[in-house]
Structure formats: C-alpha cells, structure tokens
Amino acid sequence: MNVTVETLAPCKKLVRIEVDAAAVDAAFEEVGKKFVRQVSIPGFRPGKAPKAMVLRRYESGIQEEVKKKLLPDSYSQAVKDQNLKVIGYPDIEEIQFGKGQSLQFAATIETAPEFELPEYKGLPVKRESKQVTDEDVEKALTTLRERVAKFETVTRPAQDGDVVVVNYKGTSDGKPLTELAPTAKGITEKENFWIAVDPKAFIPGFGPQLAGASAGDKREVNIEFPADFVQGSLSGKKAVYAVEVVEVKERILPDEDDALAKQYGADTLDKLKEGIRNDLTNELNMRQKRSVREQITKGLLDKVTCDLPEGLISNETREIVYSIVNENQRRGVPQETIEAQKNEIFSNATITARERVKASFVFGRIAEKESLKVEQADLIQRIQMMAMQYEMPADKLAKDLQANNRINAVAEQVLHEKVLELLESTANFEDVAA
C-alpha cells in the first residue's frame, strides 16, 4: 500500500492511498466465495450455484462489499502508519476502483494541532479577600421584603420608591412607536402599566420623570433608547411618551420579624438571616471559584500558540449560536431582534468557540500527561447532578444523552473538571482586597 500526505492548510491534510491490484483481487476472491456460500438462486441448493453465475448476478453487491472492506481497513492502516491524529470523520473521494486494478482514493482530514505543552503548575492567580458582612445580609433581607411588599393607593404626588400606574403612547420623530416596533406592544403603548419611580425601572430614565406626578396628571416623558436596547429597531432612537397618570401607589414593606421569616419558610427572623448568610456565602464562594478558574484557563491558554481545526470551530460555533438563539427565544426576545443581532451573535460565538476548542486540546494533553481519566462512577455522578438541575429522572437523561451521542461530551466536561482541579490545587495564589 502506498500513502502520501499533503498539507492543505493548518490542521488539514490530504491523504492519498493506493492499494495494489493484487490485494484488490484477493478481496474480490474472498468476498466472491462468501457470496457463493451464502446466496440462494432458484434451481440450486444454497451454496451449490455455479460460481460464475453468482459472480455475474451479484456483481454490484460484491463490488460494494469489497469496497466496504478495503476502504476503512486501508484508511485506518494509513492513519496508523503515518501517525496522524485525526479529528472527526474523513471526507473520502474515490479515484479508481475495480477488479484487476489498484484501489486509489483520497481522504481529506483534520488533525489535532501541534504545540508544546507549557508549564501548567504554579499559575499565578489573584483571589479576592472578601467575607459576607452584616450589611450584605441586610441588603438581601430588604430585597426579600420588597418581593412581598404591599401597594396602597395614595392621593399625594409620586416620590422615590413609589409605583405609578399609567397609560402611555410613544412616538419617535412624530411616528408612533407601534410602526417602528409593531411586535413590542409593552414598549410602544400600554394601559394601566405599573412603573416604579426608579432610574432602572422600565426604560432607563423613564421612572424619575414621573416624580411629583399625581393621579389625573398628564406628562410628556422624553427618553433615548440605549444603543444595546433589546428591541433592535428602537436602539439609539429618541422617543416622546404621552403619559396619563391613573394612580400613585406607595410601597409598604413588611416588618423585619418572625412573620416575614415564615413567609420564606423559616421559623424565626434569626433563622432567616442565617439562611441568607449561608446562601450569600455559597454564592461568594462560587463566584470566587469561577474567577480563579477563568484566570487559570486564560493564563494557560495565553501560553499556547497553535493553529486550530476550522471544522471543529465551525461545529462549536453552530452549537453556541443555537444555544444563544434558544435562550433568547425562551426569554421572549422577538425574532426580528435576534435577526438584527445575528452578525454580532455569530462573531461572539466564533470567539468563544475558538477558546473552547483550544482549551479542549490543551486540557486533553494535560490529562494525558497526568494520567487523568473519567471513570464510570464519575460519569454517573455528573449525569445525576445534571438530572437534578433539569428536574428529570437520571436514567431518562442518560438515555437521551446516548440517543443524541452526547455522552462523550459529558465525559469531556468531567475530564476538564479534573484538569481544572489539578491546576487549581497547584496554582500560586495572591490574596487581594475586594
């Protein structure tokens, strides 16, 4: 067998393979004998039909069987002989095939990148020295009180912290906003809409212009939509809203007492505060851990310069875009908004895809060097955790993952987790002020 390898691009090669005619004829002879033994022809007992008749009648089937035997076998042998680290599946082009002649075909493949593995232990990491304070607990408690607040109608003018019930219609350059954004009814016009007298409420800058308004008042509210506004057709535009005030409501927060605690499933206020502190501590620890791992990953990848398989990047980009679009649709973002931002979404997804693909190769090399492996128990534990997150039975999730060929992806996640644990345990930490 003759094999030549041609580099088409970084991480992309063309492998030309030729199997000599003698080997091809031997394969035809072997397959032909199998057909003679197995096929049934009317008038003959199984395996007793004349060989020439079988070969003539089943010529095309025999050719396909020979091809199925020779192509994968010779391709696998060529990859092994040339020590090629192939990624994904080859694109096979048949050039010559037939009895009495050599088999010639070409395989276009992508290969793993070549790079020197840098020193990955002792990576510098800055870690914030921060603890959950009493003030943090009180802020969180205030948020919980606001969630169960009551609203009472008042006759005085609106002030900070109040909610104003309004009817409104918006225009931009004299045109109704309904023409510019016909699908965004809540943004363009609404009746009996509650808006807090707060700079961040509704459209930025809208709420504060309602301060001092009373029931029955009519006001003109001027705003400028942010450049990154979720409704793309309104991004950066100036608008004027004709607003009619229906009611002014005062927010009444519940007292900090055991009754409040019971609304959140705690026996006493002290127990509620203890639970808040634990939650904030867990959140802080997760945030610090995420920051540490981001620094470790970036520090490691910055040390590696290599080309990457474009096919893998394209596949990863498609998955990321699909995930982003699905998430936006789940959140109710209009299709036209997603369409308007498609170039930005694709650009950002490509950057993320390159980082993920690069990390996958670097982490894989570290795992190989450190003999890190994913055991069956590791995989079961990860699937159980995912099942809890998705609120579905673990066995059903496992079957779904297998049906969609996602088990290997989960195993890779577990392996990367082990690599990150190793890198974290050997990192050089510097504690810094928050």
Image: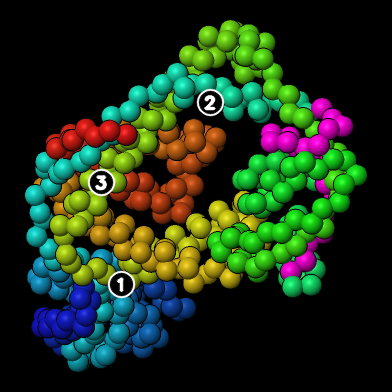
Q: Dot 3, crowdedness within 10 Å: few (<14), some or many (≥20)? A: some
Where does label 3 land, which residue?
295
Report crowding for label 1: few under 14, some 14 to 19, many 20 or more residues within 10 A (C-alpha). Answer: some
Residue situated in front as seen by the camera: 385 or 353: 353
**Can residue 225 be seen in this snapshot?**
yes
Residues at badges 2 and 3 in contact (C-beta under 8 Å)?
no
Q: Residue at x 49, y 47 (%)?
A: 400
The image shows residue 314, relative to residue 302, as above or below, that is below
- Which residue is identified by label 2? 140
User: Magenta residues: mostly which secondary structure?
Assistant: strand
Alpha-carbon span between mark 2 and mark 3: 29 Å
Vertical order, 244 against 255 (above or below) = below
- Please identify, in this view, whether the residue under mark 3 or under mark 1 is nearer the observer: 3
Q: Percent position (x, y) of residue 3?
A: 12, 81
Q: Residues within 10 Å of mark 2 (few under 14, many from 20)?
A: some
Residue type at tag 2: Ala
Q: Which residues are magenta?
A: 152-172
Q: Residue at x 13, y 66 (%)?
A: 114
User: Magenta stretch: residue 76 in it?
Assistant: no
Dot placed on the residue nearer the N-terminal end, 3 or 1: 3
